[in-house]
Image (tube, rainbow, N blue to C red):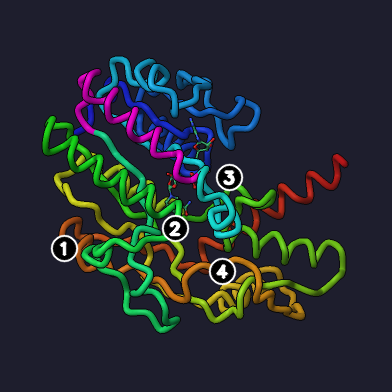
Amino acid sequence: MANLNDKVVVCGAGGFIGGHLVSDLLAKGHKNIRAVDIKPFGEWYQRFPEAENLQLDLQEKPACYKSLKDAKNVYNLAADMGGMGFIENNRCLCMLSVLINTHLCMAAKDCGVDRYFYASSACVYNADKQRDPNVTALIEEDAYPGQPEDGYGWEKLFSERMCRHFREDYGLKTRVARYHNVYGPNGTYDGGREKAPAAISRKVIEAKLTGKHNIEIWGDGHQTRSFMYITDCLKGTQNLLAGDIIEPINLGSSELVSINQLVDIVEDIAGIKLKRSYNLKAPKGVNGRNSDNTLIKKLMGWEPDTKLRAGMEKTYRWIHDQMTSKRKSA
Ligand code: NAD
């Protein structure tokens, strides 16, 4: 049972998942939350006056020691990341996030942190297992032999390993989730870092608002993915930190859809049909990827279960509100 007075540090709290996590921890009664992000406060998706908010660059070692002072539990959600458009074109920036996890692990050991969560990704999985859109869902062992997504995936795989060795050598209770595509309100939907659910919502809303009923889809639309709604991500993440699962574990939905099917869902929510064009030169990632949830069901007795349609309704509405209020104030 969590002591609500323990200091909990959320790194990357100005981001999509971090902002939701701070919100959820406050709602659960946590009284001692430190929220850290490199972004200026005005750019955080969510910021709460009840938390201690710090703007720090966690690639810097002293910033990590300052952030983790007196901390009991730490969530490391800080990374330079985005959708395929970002990670395929910014491999170096993605790999430099290795400094964040490395310095945070060192600080966690020296500051006497009890439990440390690291947000890994399905991008650690071996590319050879993801060539067919009719995927066999990925099990945890499929991360080895290592052939992850270039740049971003290598950083995640290395940082998973770093967490493992801090646990084995120093007794830091590290916990690692491999997130599969998380989506929901209060995240990025334009500017180049957005992922498919937000990008497709934005494009459908733009088509609706401008009356130009076309949509460009990256790839041939047959590539398949699963998408996890933010509330499932928060539940799995907190259960993982509190529990005894020491090996990296899938945290994702097993509801597999093609990108074309995702567009169908968003069109249906918007009440519109668009003419589709396919940009085969755009970054599209692997052909197929799904989360095998056998292990999480066995160990947690649960798996992410929010239906894509229900989560996309909420995501679409939020992006729609943002876009229409921006248009009004322009
Ligand atoms: P996000 O980009 O919205 O949030 C990441 C936050 O980290 C940003 O606010 C960013 O400013 C901050 N950050 C980056 N560099 C920093 C630094 N040097 N110091 C301090 N803060 C820094 O991304 P998110 O979707 O909330 O993802 C959170 C974590 O989950 C990341 O580690 C990401 O790689 C991982 N993940 C996310 C997904 C997903 O679908 N969203 C999937 C797999 C893994």
Residue carrying label 4? 284
Q: How dense is the environment of label 2, judged by Cα within 10 Å: few (below 14), some, or many (20 and up)?
A: some
Residue 113: x and y in percent read: 23, 24
User: Where 76 sits versus 290, above or below?
Assistant: above
Q: How dense is the environment of label 4, judged by Cα within 10 Å: few (below 14), some, or many (20 and up)?
A: some
Residue at image position (13%, 30%) is: 170
Residues rendered magenta in the picture: 94-115
Q: Nearer the viewer, mark 3 or mark 4?
A: 4
Secondary structure, mark 2, is loop
Seen in the image, is 25 located left or right of residue 318?
Answer: left
Upstream in sequence: badge 3 or badge 2: 2
Residue carrying label 3? 186
Q: CA distance from mark 3 to mark 1?
A: 32 Å
Q: Residue furthest front?
A: 92
- Amino acid on which disc 3 is placed: Asn
Which of 200 and 78 lies nearest the eye of the viewer?
78
Q: How dense is the environment of label 1, judged by Cα within 10 Å: few (below 14), some, or many (20 and up)?
A: few
Marking on residue 150: 2
Q: Nearer the viewer, mark 1 or mark 2?
A: 2
Residue 187: x and y in percent read: 58, 46
Residues tagged 3 and 2 counted as in contact (Cβ below 8 A): no
Number of disc labels: 4
Q: CA distance from mark 3 to mark 4?
A: 24 Å
